[in-house]
Amino acid sequence: MTEIVFWALLGLLNWDMAGDDDAVVEPVVVALSLKSEAEIRQFEEILSAKLYALDTIKHAKEIGEDGYVDESQYFSVDWFLYARCAVVANGEEFYKEVVTSPRRFPKDIEFEALLSIGATAFERKTGQEYNYVTKVSYETYSNSNGWSSLRQSSP
C-alpha cells in the first residue's frame, strides 16, 4: 500500500455521520476489507508511523485544555493518542501542517475510532482476530526523540 492509497482511504471517512464514530469509519473499513491481508497490515504500518511522528512534547502541549504542562500535572496518554488520531483523520494536507507546526494542532478533539479500522477490516475479511504488531508503536512517549527535551530536563 502506498501513502497515496492510505490517504485516499482516509478520504472515505463519512463526516456526515459525525457523532457516530462507527458510521464515520465504516466506508474505510469496507474498502480496506476488500484489500489483501498484507495491505491491511501496510495500512496499519503507515497509520502507526503518522501517529508516532506526532508523538512529541511540542505537540502534546498544543492539544487544548488537557495538554501536557509538566511532570507534576496529570497528562492523559490515551487522550493525547486519540487527539493525534484526529489530526491524521483530517487528511494529508492538515497532517503535514500539524507535523511541522505543532501550534496548528486542533484543540480538545479526538477520534479514537481511527485505531479500530485495520483490525475491523481484517476481522471482516478473515473472520479471525487481528493481532498484528506494527514496527513502531504509536503509544504516547514511544517517540523518544519527540520527548527528548523532557528526558534531558529530568534529574
Image (cartoon, rainbow, N blue to C red):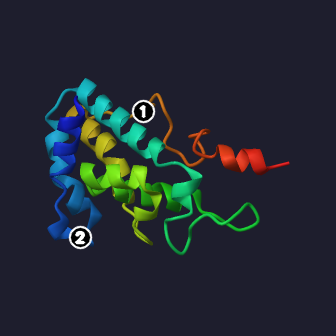
The amino acid marked with disc number 1 is Asn
Secondary structure found at label 1: loop
Residue drawn at x 71%, y 68% as measured from the top left: 73
Checking the image for residue 131, the label placed there is: 1
Outermost residue, front side: 101
Counting from the top left corner in percent of width and height, residue 148 is at 66, 43
Q: Is residue 41 left or right of residue 13?
A: right
Q: Tell me which residue sits at (24%, 28%) in the image.
A: 39
The residue that appears at 56% across and 63% down in the rendered structure is: 61
How many numbered marks does the figure carry? 2
| Residue 96 in view in this figure | yes
In this rendering, would 103 be left or right of 27?
A: right
Picture coordinates of residue 116, whole percent (x, y): 34, 49
Tell which residue pokes out farthest to the top in this image.
38
| Residue under pointer 2 | 18
Residue 21 marker: none
**Residue 93 % position (x, y):** 25, 52
Q: Is residue 108 above or below residue 129?
A: below
Q: Residues within 10 Å of mark 2 (few under 14, many from 20)?
A: few
Quadrant for the N terminus, please: top left
Within 10 Å of disc 1 (Cα), the crowding (few <14, some 14-19, many 20+) is: few
> Distance between the Cα atoms at labels 2 and 1?
28 Å
Label 1 near label 2: C-beta < 8 Å? no
Q: Is residue 124 visible?
A: no
Which residue is at 70% across, 63% downward? Answer: 70
Residue 18, percent across and down?
Answer: 23, 70
Disc nearer the start of the sequence (2/1): 2
Q: Quadrant of residue 60?
A: bottom right
Q: Nearer the viewer, residue 139 or 22?
A: 139
Which tag is nearer the camera, tag 2 or tag 1?
A: 2
Residue 6 picture quarter: top left
